[in-house]
Image: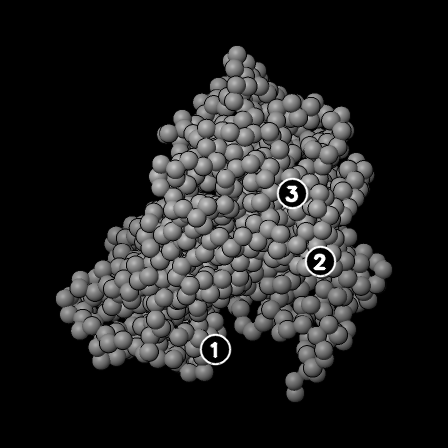
Amino acid sequence: MRIPIACAAAALLVAAGCVPVSSTPPSAASYDLVVAATTDVHGRVRGWNYESNRADSTRGLTRAATIVDSVRRSAPGRVILLDAGDLLQGNSLTYMAARVSAPEAPHPVIQAMNAMAYDASAVGNHEFNYGLPFLERTIAQATFPFLATNAYRLDGTHAFRGWALMQRGPVKVGIVGATTPGSMIWDRDNLAGRLVIRDIVPEVRTAVSEARLAGADVIVVTMHSGLEGVSSYDTVSTGVPSENVAARLAREVSGIDLIVFGHSHQEVGDTVINGVLLVQPKNWATSVAVAHLALAQQGAGWRVVEKHSTVVQAARHAELPSVVAATQVAHDATIKWVLTPIGRTPVAWRTDSARLTNTPLIDFILDVERRATGADLASTAAFSLDASLDSGSITAARLQALYPYDNTLRAVRISGAQLRAYLEQSARYYRTSPTGAVSVDPQIPGYNFDIIGGADYTLDVSRPVGQRVTHLAVRGREVVPTDSFTLALNNYRQTGGGGYTMVSGAPIVYDKQQEIRQLLVDEVRRKGTIVPADYAAHNWHIEPASAVTSLYAELHRNNRDDAHAVGAAAAIPASTGRRPRPATRLRILGTNDFHGALEPRPDNSGRRRGGAAYLATAIHQAGQGCVSPSCETILLDGGDEFQGTPASNLAFGRPDVDMFNQLGLAASALGNHEFDWTQDTLRARMRDARYAILGANVRYADGRDVSWIRDDTLIVRGALKVGVIGLATVATPSTTRASNVSDLRFLAPAPIVDSLTRALRARGADYVIVIGHLGAYCDRDGATNCKGEVVDLAQALREPVDAIVSGHTHSLVNATINGIPITQGRSSGTALGIIDLGPDGSAHQVVDVVTDSLVPDPAVAAIVSAAVARVAPLVNRPVATIARDLVRTGNQYALGNLIADAMRGVGKGDVAVMNNGGIRANLRAGPASYGTLFEVQPFANILYRVTVTGSALRAYLENLVAHTPSVHVSGVTISYDSTRVAGSRIVSARFSDGRDISPDARYAIILNDFLATGGDGLAVTKGAISTEILPIVDLDALIMYMEARPQPIEGPTDARIILLPLPR
C-alpha cells in the first residue's frame, strides 16, 4: 500500500504536489516516474582533487552514482537519469583526456556516465572548449544521446539530436535538450562558420510539440541555461540570444512537466513556475536532484497529476565500485601526470598581493606570453590569490592551479586609446564610496581584474571610474591615443569576455592555438630552475598608498569579499560617540516571528492572542500617539514572517506578504525560516513584497555578495531619514534546510553593522535602526539578565546605532544593552514592540495583542478570511481526539514522545529522534484536525532511515546528550551523567523492551531531513551503513499513527532521556 503524504494537497496548490518513491508496483491506472539529474560536473568524476592531490569527500560522479543506485533500487524500472551539461572541461582529468591522452582513448567522464547508465545529457557551453572534432569523437563514445535542439549546422540541420523518446513501463517520456547561446561568444573561434546556437525558447517549443506528436505522455527538458537574470554579454550589440532562460521557458512554453537546468552553478530544489517543476543540482556532482512525477491514466495516454523534488548531497555517500573501476585507468594516469616534476624553484612564490602590486608569479605569466608572441604588451588575471609555487619541485598541477582555464594565446593590434580603456576596465574591480572609501566591488569577480606587462602605469582607485589611469607609459614614453601596440592576451579576453569589448574587434596578429598553460609548462621545462628575479618587473602600482593596506586586509580576511567589513571602514572615520538626535521624534513599531499566524490562538489560560487583523489594529493604535510632523512612525519586522500555519504554508507565505504590504511594513530582517522553501521561493516573495527584506551579513560561500539580498535601506519619514540594516542569524544553516543555504554563509554581523552605520550616516541618516533575526533570553521582565546573539551584537558594536528590533528566540526582550534599546515581542503576532527615539533619549515597551480588547482591522481581516477559506477543506478534516492537553514544557514532554513514536512506527525503525525545535505548537484536549496537527509540525520534513551498527548507534546517542538534550527519542531509554566528559556520559542505553544495544548488530534510526542533513549538529556523521530517503512526510507519519491508535489518544509520559543522579 502506498503511504499518503502531506503534499497530496496538490489540489490546493500545484507547487505543493509531490509523489513518493515506492518499491511496490504502481496500480494499472497510475504510474510513478522518477527523474534523477546532475549538472556542471566539469570532470569531477572521482572523489579526488587532482590539483591538491587530496581526496574530496563531498562530490564526484562516483558518489552521485551511489545515490542513483539507491533511487533505482527504490523504483525499479521507473528512473530516468539526465545531465544538464558542462561535463568535459574543468580539471586535470578532463585536460588529460583532451590534450594528453591519445585521441582514440576512452574519455573518463563518458566512461563514468556509461557505467551509470545515463539516459541523456544536454550539451554545455564548455563542451565546445576543445573544438567540435574532439566533441564529436567524445559523444560517439556515449551510450546515451547528447541533446541540443537549438544548435544548428550552417546548412540548417540540427548539429545534435534535439529530443529523444523513452519508454518507462506504460509511459512514453520525451526528453528535450538545449544549450545556452553564449557559446557563440565564449567559443566563437570553435563555432564560427561551423555551428549556430539559436534562442532556446522557440526551439524548445518546437521540439516539445514534435515529442508530443510522437506520443510523449511526459516532457522533461534538460537545458544548459540558468534560471533567469541578465546575460553576461550584451544581447543587443552581439545579437546573441539570452543566456539564462529556464524560468522564461517554464512561463512561455506549454506542455513541459519538468525542467532540469544548469550553467549557473547554483542549487535549486522543489520549485514550480507556471505549473512546471524546476530543479538544479549543485555543480561538480556535489548533489543529485531527484524529481518524482505521479501520473494517472487518461484515455489511451497518461498525464502528470503530482510532482515533487528533492536534492540529495553527495557528501557522506560512498563511491560506487563499478564507476570507480570504469575510470581507474584514467584516474591513475592523471595523478601520475600532475605529480610528475617538470622543474624546480629554490624559493616560494605567492600571489596574495597580485591584485594590488607587482608579483613575480604574475610577471612570469606575462613574460611567457610576450616572448611567445613577440608582442609589446601582455595581459593576464590573477585567477586566485591562493595560488603559489612552493620551494622544491614544480608540477603541472601547481601550474594548473595558477592558470586554471584552458585559454589559448593570441595577440592583437591596439591603439593607445584602447590600452587606456583596457586598464580603466580593469580598475573597475575597485570601488569608491561618496565619502572616498575604497573597497573591492563584490559584483566584479577577481578574474576580471587584469594586469598588463610591458607598460608602466598607475591606478588611482580613489578617482571616479573611467578616470583612474593617472600615468601610462611604454618604453619610457607617455602613451597617447594614436599610439599603436601589440597586446598578448587569452582568447576569452580577445573576444571581449569580462566586459573588455574595446579589444573584441582589434586585428589579430598572432594566433597559433597554443594553450597558455602549456606554454607555462614549456617555460619551466626549458629553464629547469626558475627564480623570481628572472621575471619581476615592478611596472605598476595602486594609489593612494593608504588604500593598499586596507584592501589587502579585505581580500584576505575570512569574509574577503565583504566590502562592508573593511573597505568602507577604511575611509569613514569611526564615531567618537553617539551623535545628537534631531528634534523630530521617531516611533518604531516592531514585530517579529509572525510565522504565518493569521488567526488568533489561545494561550495556556484560554485567552486568545495575536491574529493578523488584531495585530493590525494594535499597530494603528500604537501609531496614534505619534503625530507628524513632530513625530514620525515606522513599522519594522525582525524576521521569520513565514512557516507555521496551513493558510500561510500552502500558499508559500503569500498571505503574510499581503498582510505586511497592507500594514505598510518598511523593512524586514531575513529570518532562517525564510529559506525553508528554497531560495527561488524566497526571491518570489521578495518580488511580491513592497518592503525591503534585508540580510547584510549573507554572502555566497566563495565570499561574493548576494546581489538579490539587500544590506540596508534609507527610508524617508517626514523630515527624517531613517537608515535600516537587516541581519540574519549566523545559525541559519543549522536552523533551516541545510540544502537550501548550502551555497551561502552567514557572517559575524558586528563589523558589517559598524561600516554600514557609518555609510548610512554619511548618506544623511538621522537614525540608524538594526532589524536582526538575532535572539536573546532575559528574565521574566524581559529587561534584566539578557543573554544571546542580539546582546552580543549590541555589546560588540563600535559605531552606535539607535535601536534594534530583534527576533528568532520567540521571547520577551524589552531591554537596553550598551545604550541601545532592544525589543522582541515573543512570536506569532502576540505582542508588539514600541521604541520611542528623540532628542532627550529613548523609551521602549512591549505590549500584548489580546483579542478581547481590540477590534479586528477589516482590510487585514479580509486577507485572512480569503487565505483561510482556500485551505479550509483540508484543514478542517478531523484526524483524532486528544485525551488531555499536550503542552511543550521543559525539554521532555508527552507530545514529543508521541511524535517520536509516530516516526519510529511509520518509518519502521528501531530508534527515532525528533528535534524539539520542529515541534511548533501545543496540542489541546479534544478533536484534533489536520490544521491543528499541521501547526504542530508545519515544516513538511521528509523522514530518513539511517542504518548503523550498534556501536555507531551508541556513539550517536552520546551526541544527543553531549549538551542538554533538546530532542525526544523513541524505542530507547537513555540514562546519562552530565558531569562526565562529553562522549562518555551515557550510563545506560537500552531499547524500550529492555534489550541491550549489541555493538555489532545493525539498527535503523529514523530522523527527519533537518537532522539527517546536519540540523542542530545531529546528523549521523560516523558509522552509517546506508541512508534511505523515505517517501514519508513527518506530518503524514503523525496523522497515520494517530488515526491507527485507540481514541482518545493519551500522550506517552514515560521518561526516555534521564539525567543522573536524579534530583532529590
10 or 326, which lies in front? 326
Task: Tell me residue 845's x, y (percent).
Answer: 31, 75
Q: Label 2 crowding class (10 Å Cα cut-off): few <14, some 14-19, many 20+?
A: some
User: Relative to residue 490, is residue 1041 depicted above or below?
Assistant: below
540 or 596, which lies in front? 540
Q: Is residue 766 visible?
A: yes
Residue at (30, 62) in percent of width and height: 435
Q: Amino acid at mark 1?
A: Lys
Can you tell which quarter of the image residue 416 is in?
Answer: top left
Circle 1 — which element?
loop
Residue at mark 2 to residue at mark 3: CA–CA distance: 18 Å
User: Relative to residue 299, is residue 1018 depicted above or below?
Assistant: below
- Pointer 2 residue: 346
Residue 787 tag number: 1
- Left or right: residue 766 versus residue 675 is left
Residue at (73, 26) in percent of width and height: 103
Residue at (40, 46) in percent of width and height: 477
Task: Tell me residue 101's x, y (percent).
Answer: 75, 32
Q: Is residue 610 visible?
A: no
Quadrant showing the N terminus: top right
- Pointer 3 residue: 520
354 or 438, which lies in front? 354
Q: Label 3 crowding class (10 Å Cα cut-off): few <14, some 14-19, many 20+?
A: many
* Foreground disc of the pair 1, 3: 3
